[in-house]
Amino acid sequence: MGLIESNNTNAQLHIALLKGIPPVNKNIDDENAWITVLCKKLSPWWPWIATGEIPLTANKGKEISEYQGLNPINRLKFLKALCELR
């Protein structure tokens, strides 16, 4: 359900994976800060670990609401890319 709905389970999974990629951001445990950290970590690596354009990039906090509006397929792409990077 965490992939279908952007919920706490989804957040906990991403946070756990992000904590394994140095340097660890101190604000990662804030409510939705993990989305910004996710975008910043994946952006430079996306061409090597995923196909196509990155569905979302860090954009002064707008990425948080945009992530929550992403379809489940794109959320799954982010999770897969995060696993590849980890």
Image (cartoon, helix red, strand yellow):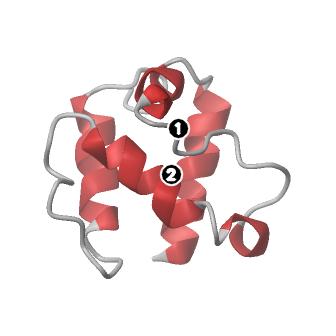
Q: Is residue 11 left or right of residue 35?
A: left
Name the residue rendered at 33%, 65% in the picture: 17
Residue receiving disc 2? 39
Instruction: Give the quarter of the image for residue 56.
Output: top right
Q: Could you tell me residue 59's position as x and y percent?
A: 52, 38
Q: Could you tell me residue 15's position as x and y percent?
A: 26, 55
Instruction: Give the quarter of the image for residue 57.
Output: top right
Q: Crowding at label 2, few (<14), some or many (≥20) Cα neighbours within 10 Å?
A: many
**Helix, strand or loop status at disc 1:** loop
- Real-space Cα distance between discs 1 and 2? 9 Å
Name the residue rendered at 35%, 77% in the picture: 21
The amino acid beneath tag 2 is Cys
Name the residue rendered at 17%, 34% in the picture: 31
- Farthest residue, direction front: 60
Q: Is residue 74 above or below residue 54?
A: above
Q: Nearer the viewer, residue 49 or 25?
A: 25
Q: Nearer the viewer, residue 74 or 45?
A: 45
Q: Is residue 1 above or below residue 21?
A: above
- Farthest residue, direction bottom: 22
Q: Could you tell me residue 27's position as x and y percent?
A: 17, 54
Question: Could you tell me which quadrant the N terminus lies in?
Answer: top left
Residue receiving disc 1? 59
Q: Is residue 70 above or below residue 52?
A: above
Q: Is residue 11 left or right of residue 68?
A: left
Instruction: Give the quarter of the image for residue 19.
Output: bottom left
Q: Nearer the viewer, mark 1 or mark 2?
A: 1
CB contact under 8 Å: marks 1 and 2: yes
Q: Could you tell me residue 14's position as x and y percent?
A: 34, 52
Upstream in sequence: badge 1 or badge 2: 2
Name the residue rendered at 85%, 52% in the picture: 52
The amino acid beneath tag 1 is Asn
Q: Is residue 3 left or right of residue 29?
A: right
